[in-house]
Amino acid sequence: MGCNSYRRGDVGGDFRSESCVTDVVRNIVRAQKKAVEAEENTCLTGCDRSINELLSPFEENRERIRHNTIPFMLFSKECGKPFTGVGVRQRHNKGSNHSFFECIESPVFRVKSFLDNSDSCVRLELLTPVSGPSGKPGSNQNPDADRHCHDRHGSSLCNILPRHTRNFRATGISITVDLHCFCGISCLDPITPLH
């Protein structure tokens, strides 16, 4: 997708406009809100297709559940590589009164909201991959994959995500980013993240 032929309200184009990533994320926010509203009343990947699928009319005999999230990846202007968000959360050790801080990183996000009075700053939640039938976090991640722009070996998205990712888990970790810092966005099919 890109921005060369981008029109407001449209989500097509070729990354030449500073606002194309912002506009796509704004459309995702609107679509997710509409999907949640519709769910409360009833119950090929690409951003256009994902938004349309998320907003498709609810059908009573539909085989899949109504999803509420369009996960996506952002690509940096400096090197065109997937941006990896990093956050820390506090976890409680089962069976003891101790807690620890856990570092989470992921290139996959769901948009939570635009910040008040901002046209490009958004709050994103990190989503972690879930693979295998047990629904456990993916274990196929390459721990040695350097995700920095200058690394030419191992920074492929395919080396970051597990091979058989079947869903994503909401982490509760939010980061705030300025969408003008990115040159591209890639949407995944709509999902309902696991909690």
Image (cartoon, helix red, strand yellow):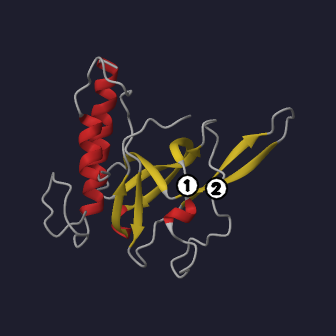
* Residue 13 % position (x, y): 19, 64
The amino acid sitting under disc 2 is: Asn
Quarter of the rendering occupied by the C terminus: top right
Q: Residues within 10 Å of mark 2 (few under 14, many from 20)?
A: some
Q: Residue at x 38, y 69 (%)?
A: 181
Looking at the image, which residue is at 50% across and 59% down? 107
Indicate which disc, 1 or 2, sits on the residue closer to the N terminus. Answer: 2
Q: Residue furthest right?
A: 96
Q: Is residue 114 left or right of residue 89?
A: left
In the picture, which quadrant includes the N terminus?
bottom left
Cα distance, mark 1 to mark 2? 7 Å
Q: Within 10 Å of the Cα at label 1, are there few (<14), some (14-19), or many (20+) other Cα atoms?
A: some
For label 2, the residue is 140
Question: Residue 36: which quarter of the image?
Answer: top left
In the displayed structure image, the side of residue 154 where residue 115 appears, left or right = left
Amino acid, disc 1:
Arg
The reply, left or right, for residue 60 in relation to residue 182 is left
Asked which quadrant contains residue 141, the reply is: bottom right
Residue 72 position in % (x across, y down): 40, 53
Q: Which residue is mark 1?
A: 163
Determine contact: label 1, label 2, CB under 8 Å: yes
Expressed as whole percent of the image width and height from the top left, the position of residue 148 reads 55, 75
Task: Return the x and y of residue 193 as percentages of the image width and height.
Answer: 49, 38
Return the residue nearer the eye: 7 or 166. 166
Residue at 34% across / 61% down in the picture?
185
Label ID, residue 58: none
Q: Is 97 rendered above or below residue 26? A: above
* Looking at the image, residue 28 lies above or below residue 94: below
Mark 2 residue element: loop
